[in-house]
Image: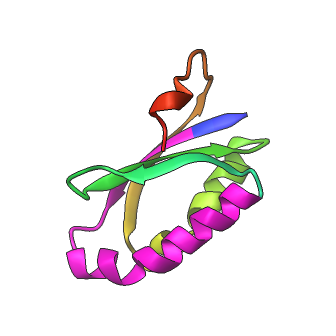
Amino acid sequence: MKFAAVIDYSTDASKIAQFRPVHREYILGLKEKNKVVLAGPFTDDSGGLLVYEAETQEEAEKLIRDDPFFKEGVFVSWVLRGWKVVQANTALLP
């Protein structure tokens, strides 16, 4: 099942920049394990959108809490909801 997370970041731009490389490594590892569908920051760097593939909401929540951005205080809050894909235009995805 897919879970969409809208995540708010800390306002500390230096902290975001410092931990972004390890966060992206973590997300790449999730992608390789088929645990992340898509991920990316909002253009104003106030947060991001991540869509996880998980069996339960608790598993998706664990994926968030295991993220270096959470561990280092970049993730300050989020909303996590089950999500069902009805349409997708893969030609518009990177």
> Farthest top residue?
86
Please identify the quarter of the rendering in which residue 33 is found. bottom right
Residue 58 position, x and y percent, is: 70, 49
Residue at position x 35%, y 84% in the image: 18
* Above/below status of 85 relative to 46: above
Find out whether residue 55 is within the magenta segment.
no
Judge left or right: residue 61 versus residue 43: right
Judge left or right: residue 56 versus residue 48: right
| Quadrant of the snapshot with the N terminus | top right
Residue at position x 37%, y 63% in the image: 76
Judge left or right: residue 63 versus residue 47: right
Residue 65 position, x and y percent, is: 58, 65
Dominant secondary structure (helix, strand or loop) of the stretch shown in magenta: helix
In this rendered view, identify the residue nearer to me: 55 or 25: 25
Magenta-drawn segment: 4-32
Residue 7 position, x and y percent, is: 40, 51
Please identify the quarter of the rendering in which residue 90 is found. top right
> Farthest front residue?
91
Q: Please indicate, yes or no, whether residue 66 appears anywhere in the rendered image.
A: no
In this rendered view, identify the residue nearer to me: 74 or 85: 85
